[in-house]
């Protein structure tokens, strides 16, 4: 008998994380192209921009990458604490993470519209509030992705996925997907989805969102994140349903896996 294909929970998690990866690519397209040489999702880029700025080269301001790095760290740290608290009490931590991300993006979009109208938030110092809000949202995203712990899909960067994908293909260059085990197929699919997702998000963000201006572009991304959170609450994963049922029966539920009882 042939090996079964990827289980529904694996496919569902891969699909959700792919969409979140696309959103991250779109956020960085909007932030870099309309908020002035700053990445709000790709923290590595901001570290380099800050280094260039401190060295006095590259025409890069210090304030924007420094704000983005600081806000990202705060979002990641606070997110880890809040999501852990929610998971320990059987709350829908994944939806909480997505909702928080969406609300922070909407906050950044609101500030951008109020201060810059339908244009780019790249002039003057007032855009630092927008940069901070968006980077805070992406820090929270990092905490959400780390807690979910889907191998090969951090949603915010693609370097590791590229390296793993190339290494895997070179190691087995003649092995088609059909000849691979389910785990191998799933891993290669996730690495590919991460790379393609970041690229697709960058393209879509550049072509569709950047022309809208910073504020309205952030509203679009925020709406998608909030819709994902609402969908997760409307159709909770099987693990969360079982935990709630056990608690209704007065039994003590146990957490399932490192992501808690509520992985999508």
Image (spheres, rainbow, N blue to C red):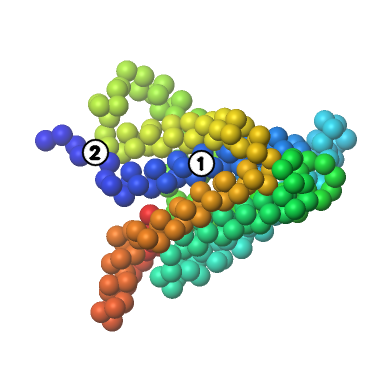
Q: Where is residue 161 in the image (x, y as percent from the top left)?
A: 49, 34
**Quarter of the view holding residue 140:** bottom right
Disc 1, SS: helix
Q: Mark 1 points at which residue?
A: 21
Asked whether the residues under the numbered discs 1 and 2 touch, taking CB atoms below 8 Å apart as contact, a structural biologist would say no
Residue 105: give its label. Answer: none
User: Image quadrant for the C terminus?
Assistant: bottom left
Residue pushed farthest front?
A: 117
| Numbered disc total | 2
- Which residue is drawn at the image coordinates 46% and 63% (left, top)? 93
**Quarter of the view holding residue 87:** bottom left
Q: Where is residue 92 in the image (x, y as percent from the top left)?
A: 43, 65
Residue 44 vs 86, above or below: the answer is above
Label 2 neighbourhood size at 10 Å, few (<14), some (14-19), many (20+)? Answer: few
34 vs 207, left or right, is right
Q: Position of residue 134 (x, y in %)?
A: 66, 50
Mark 1 or mark 2, earlier in chain:
2
User: Image quadrant for the N terminus?
Assistant: top left
Label 1 neighbourhood size at 10 Å, few (<14), some (14-19), many (20+)? Answer: many
Q: Which of the two discs, 1 and 2, sits closer to the camera?
A: 1
CA–CA distance in space, label 1 to label 2: 23 Å
Disc 2, SS: loop
- Which residue is drawn at the image coordinates 45% and 52% (left, top)? 228
Residue 208 vs 248, above or below: the answer is above
145 vs 236, left or right, is right
Q: Name the residue under label 2.
A: 5
- Which residue is drawn at the image coordinates 82% and 41% (left, top)? 123
């Amino acid at each position: 008998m042939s090996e079964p294909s990827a289980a529904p929970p694996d496919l569902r998690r891969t699909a959700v994380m792919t969409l979140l990866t696309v959103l991250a690519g779109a956020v960085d397209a909007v932030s870099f192209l309309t908020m002035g040489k700053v990445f709000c999702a790709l923290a590595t880029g901001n570290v380099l921009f800050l280094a260039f700025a401190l060295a006095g080269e590259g025409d890069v301001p210090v304030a924007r990458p420094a704000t983005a790095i600081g806000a990202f760290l705060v979002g990641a740290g606070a997110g880890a604490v809040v999501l852990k608290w929610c998971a320990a009490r059987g709350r829908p931590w994944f939806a909480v993470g997505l909702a928080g991300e969406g609300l922070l993006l909407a906050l950044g979009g609101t500030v951008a519209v109020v201060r810059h109208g339908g244009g780019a938030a790249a002039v003057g110092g007032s855009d630092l509030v927008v940069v901070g809000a968006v980077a805070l949202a992406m820090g929270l995203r990092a905490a959400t992705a780390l807690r979910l712990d889907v191998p090969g899909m951090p949603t915010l960067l693609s370097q590791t996925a590229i390296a793993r994908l190339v290494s895997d293909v070179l190691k087995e260059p003649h092995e088609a997907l059909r000849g691979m085990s389910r785990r191998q197929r799933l891993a290669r699919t996730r690495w590919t989805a991460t790379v393609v997702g970041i690229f697709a998000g960058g393209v879509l963000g550049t072509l569709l969102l950047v022309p809208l201006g910073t504020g309205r572009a952030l509203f679009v991304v925020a709406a998608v994140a909030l819709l994902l959170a609402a969908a997760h609450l409307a159709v909770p994963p099987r693990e969360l349903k079982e935990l709630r049922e056990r608690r209704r029966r007065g039994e003590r539920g146990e957490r399932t896996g490192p992501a808690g009882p509520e992985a999508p």
